[in-house]
Structures are given as C-alpha cells and as structure tokens.
Image: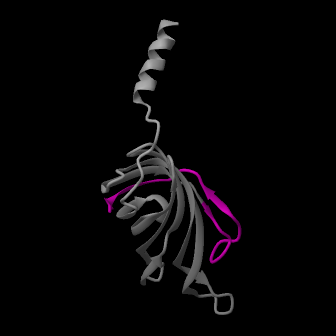
C-alpha cells in the first residue's frame, strides 16, 4: 500500500492539468530510414491541436541512385508523404501515423521478343506506418524523432503482389519554428 501511495504521489507530481499549446507549428528535418526508406529532406506542419493531441502532415524529397545489371546508373526521385498524430503534454510525445511513398525504380528486365535484358524505369509505391517517439518543444527549436516504420509495398511497377517489410525504422533531426 505504501508503494502504491508513493507511485501515485510521484505521477501526480509530474502530471500537468493542461498541455502547452504549440506556437512553433512548422518543422524542417532530415530523416534517415523511416518513411522515405533511405533518406529524405522533409517539411511538416501541425494543422490541428487540441489539448495533448496534435495532428501533423509532412512531405519530403529524396533522390535514390540505382545501378542496373547493364551498368547504367539512374537517379530516381521519391516523395514521402505522411500524416501523424502525436500525443503529449509539452515536449515529449508518442507519435503514430501512416503515409504513402511514391517513387521511381529501375531494373533490368528480360524482353520476351528479343530475349535480351533491357533497362526499364517503373513507378512504385509503398505505405509506411509509424510508431515512435517525438521530441518537439512547443516554442520551437531542436526537433528529434525516432520510430518503428514497417512498410507495405503495393503491386504496381515491378511487383506482382503486396509485400510487407516488418523490420524497418527511422530517425529524424531538424528544427521546428
């Protein structure tokens, strides 16, 4: 009983009755892994906040290098888009969300008429999920987040069926303002 009372006092002392409203609703950051798959430069904005809950939208850009078996190199764009909700009182938050990652991919494919390998650029898309931690001060400044980001890859481009990549994560660093 004494242990329960002590724990109740410690949590009661840490609890705040209201969450601080965010004045710094925008952020720019570099994400390694995560929604982009490899890396991306992102811009995000908080478009709704009520109490401890904030809703955020972000868009990014990345260029990936792909070399085919024919020794050709392609620079291919990827555009990670994400909606997240984060929950917390001041600067520490639980973050969950999902996104869409449209990208171009290149590979060598067998031409059934000539029986030769030809290089081809195809469109692909993935649906990443996010479960993680977000550090962002209400007044702005240093921004950090880390998360578990499994992917569903869609059956467009060079894929014939949905695939799930369960082991993936990401880390982001930047500035909110």
Check the image and name the residue furthest to the bottom.
114
Q: Is residue 9 left or right of residue 82?
A: left
| Image quadrant where residue 129 sits | bottom right
Left or right: where 133 falls relative to 157: left
Occupied quadrant, residue 76: bottom left
Question: Camera-side residue: 20 or 145?
Answer: 20
Question: Where is residue 68 shown, x and y percent of the image?
Answer: 47, 79
Specify start and end residues of the magenta stretch as a single range. 152-177
Q: Is residue 130 magenta?
A: no
Quarter placement of the C terminus: bottom left
Q: Is residue 56 visible?
A: yes
Residue at image point 51% right, 48% down: 51
Q: Is residue 130 visible?
A: no
User: Which residue is at the far top?
Assistant: 1
**Relative to residue 165, is residue 16 depicted above or below?**
above
Query: Between residues 140 and 117, which one lies in front from this camera angle?
Result: 140
Locate residue 60, reporting x and y percent: 44, 71
Left or right: residue 151 compared with residue 29: right
Residue farthest toward the left in the current orientation of the protein? 141
Q: Is residue 86 above or below residue 118?
A: above
Q: How is the image coloured?
A: one colour
Asked if residue 160 is positioned above or below residue 46 in the image, the reply reads: below
Q: Identify the residue shown where x is 43% and y is 66%.
A: 44
Q: Position of residue 171 (x, y in %)?
A: 39, 54
Percent position (x, y) of residue 71? 42, 82
């Amino acid at each position: 009983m004494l242990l329960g009372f002590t724990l109740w006092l410690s949590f009661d002392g840490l609890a705040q009755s209201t969450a601080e409203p965010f004045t710094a609703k925008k952020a720019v950051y570099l994400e390694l892994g995560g929604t982009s798959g490899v890396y991306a430069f992102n811009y995000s904005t908080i478009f709704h906040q009520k109490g401890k809950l904030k809703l955020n939208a972000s868009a990014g850009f990345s260029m990936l290098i792909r070399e085919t078996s024919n020794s050709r190199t392609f620079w291919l764009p990827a555009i990670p888009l994400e909606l997240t909700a984060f929950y917390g009182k001041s600067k520490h938050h639980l973050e969950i969300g999902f996104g869409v990652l449209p990208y171009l991919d290149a590979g060598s494919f067998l031409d059934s008429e000539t029986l030769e390998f030809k290089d081809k650029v195809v469109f692909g898309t993935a649906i990443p999920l996010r479960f993680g931690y977000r550090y962002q001060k209400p007044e702005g400044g240093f921004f950090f987040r880390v998360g578990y980001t499994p992917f569903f890859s869609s059956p467009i481009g060079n894929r014939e069926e949905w695939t799930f990549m369960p082991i993936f994560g990401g880390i982001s660093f930047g500035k909110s303002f």
